[in-house]
Amino acid sequence: MPNRGARILVVDDDPFIVTAVRRGLVSHGYHIEDAETLEQARRLFSQRPPDVILLDLGLPDGDGIDLVRWVRAERSTPIVVLSARESEGSKVDALTAGADDYLTKPFGMRELLARIQVALRHAAKPDSGTDAVVRAGDLELDLDRRTLSRAGAPIRLTPTEFDLLKTLMTNPDRIMTHRMLLTEVWGGVQGTDQHYLHVYVGQLRRKLDPTGSEPRHIVTEPGVGYRFVARL
């Protein structure tokens, strides 16, 4: 069960949203800090990185996507975007920049809590203490340290990218349906659809095969899902 004592940084310049989110999350045991601007958010993050960031995109001193990129250059802290922007392009931009989830305003508190729990689960390390490593060619996925490397060189993944790749690599050469992947990685949270898979699979392919024109490791099974090819 995700840690309900986790620290949440809410980045939003709408005082009504901040107050509502604070009230709802505090009542469930979370600790809340808030920032109205990118500058304030960067300062708070640098002082003490939170466990999860809830981020609006329209901020007084810039676009929230800039904060996503800045955080991703530093850490893999889960980022859940809370935005009134409903277009597919906005969602793709945020997810591609490194956000872990995207929730459109207005939203319900139960759904927000579910998204936070998923984000915390993505970021949590296994408690087993094992040193399990999944290998595929020159790729090595360390399940304990939650790291990926190619021929010893590290490949940086977001928490969601890691969980998706873990699901695929631990089921080599098996067709994983869209529903199976959505349930395993996002927990079947309401509002999560196949478009999430399309974005994240695209990001993983670029990281796994940066110079290839055709995907080698993650193969699309048209209309069904994806399959990880362990041996090339």
Image (cartoon, rainbow, N blue to C red):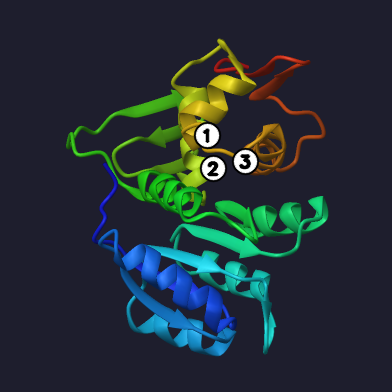
Please rate how many residues cluster around mark 1, counting C-alpha atoms within 10 Å: few if below 14, some from 14 to 19, many from 20.
many
Residue 96 in the image: above or below residue 35 = above
Which residue appears at 17% of the width and 37% of the height?
A: 129
Near-viewer residue (214 or 232): 214
Residue type for callout 2 = Glu
- Residue marked by disc 3: 191
Which residue appears at 54% of the width and 79% of the height?
A: 16
Residue 155, position as x, y percentages in the image = 52, 48
- Residue marked by disc 1: 164
| Image quadrant occupied by the N terminus | top left
| Image quadrant occupied by the C terminus | top right
Near-viewer residue (16 or 72): 16
Mark 3 or mark 1: name the one nearer the start of the chain.
1
**Is 210 on the left-hand or right-hand side of 47?**
right
Q: Please tell me the numbered disc located at residue 161.
A: 2
Please rate how many residues cluster around mark 3, counting C-alpha atoms within 10 Å: few if below 14, some from 14 to 19, many from 20.
few
Mark 2 or mark 3: name the one nearer the start of the chain.
2
Which residue appears at 23% of the width and 61% of the height?
A: 5
**Is 136 on the left-hand or right-hand side of 85?**
left
Task: Determine the CA span between mark 2 and mark 3.
Answer: 19 Å
As helix, strand or loop, the secondary structure at mark 2 comes to helix
* Mark 2 in CB contact with mark 1 (< 8 angstroms): yes
As helix, strand or loop, the secondary structure at mark 1 comes to helix
Q: Quadrant of residue 161?
A: top right
Residue 205, position as x, y percentages in the image = 68, 36
Q: Is residue 212 at least partly visible in the picture? A: yes
Residue 226, position as x, y percentages in the image = 65, 20
Residue type for callout 3 = Gly
